[in-house]
Amino acid sequence: MPDAAAPKEVTVRTYSPKASEITRAWHVIDAEGLVLGRMSTVVASLLRGKHRPTFARHLDTGDYVIVVNAARVVLTANKAAQKFAYHHSGYPGGLRQTSWATLLAEDPVTLVTSAVRGMVPKTRLGRAQMRKLFVYAGPEHPHAAQQPVTYDTSAIRRG
């Protein structure tokens, strides 16, 4: 005969958020003076939703991120001269390389976007998360109607 005072077994269920329960916020990150890699990890974490208690690896629970002043991002050490961005035309001998210094001067949006892209999953989930990233070389952005909140970057600032 079972003991009447014995506690019942408690089953803990793992919470999985539904797509309809996810609310997305808008964040603005000012990249002026921020190190590219440190900023990219924070941006990727916000895009993925890892800052939320309801994070689920199989769902897109992240927020929208606007990066302004991408042209003023900082590259540490000698990365500007030693690292290259590669692309291939598809023809023999069609490999082209561009130094990060040139890329930062001519197209900083591509530099920041590719740094963040390397930190999100390489799946259709990662592509959906990258669609929530907006990068601008200057200080202006056209997303004022979404009422974005300025993200505190004091923890990732250099120095």
Image: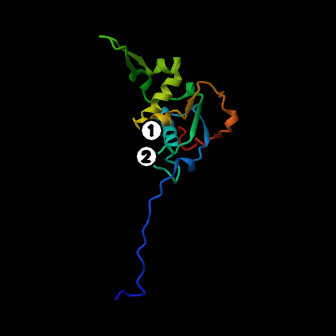
Quarter that holds the N terminus: bottom left
Within-10-Å neighbours for mark 1: few <14, some 14–19, many 20+ = some
Q: CA distance from mark 1 to mark 2?
A: 8 Å
Describe the element under mark 2 as helix, strand or loop.
loop
Q: Give the class, few, some or many, for how many residues have Cα within 10 Å of label 2's Cα (few <14, many ≥20).
A: few
Could you say which quadrant of the image residue 92 lies in? top left
The one nearer the camera, 153 or 4, is 4
Q: What's the residue at 43%, 46% (across, down)?
A: 58
- Quickly name the residue at label 2: 58
Left or right placement of residue 34 versus residue 10 in this view? right
**Residues marked 1 and 2 touching at CB (< 8 Å):** yes
Residue 33 location, x and y as percent?
56, 32
For badge 1, the amino acid type reads Leu
**Residue position marked by numbered label 1 in the rendering:** 125
- Residue 24, image x, y percentages: 59, 44
- Residue 154 shown left or right of residue 12 in the figure: right
- Tell me the element at label 1: helix
Seen at 69% across and 33% down, the residue is 144
Amino acid marked by disc 2: His
Q: Residue 119: in sight, yes or no?
A: no
Q: Residue at 52% across / 32% down in the picture? A: 131
Q: Is residue 120 left or right of residue 71?
A: left
Q: Quadrant of residue 86?
A: top left
Q: Which mark is residue 46?
A: none
**Relative side of 4 to 46, left or right:** left
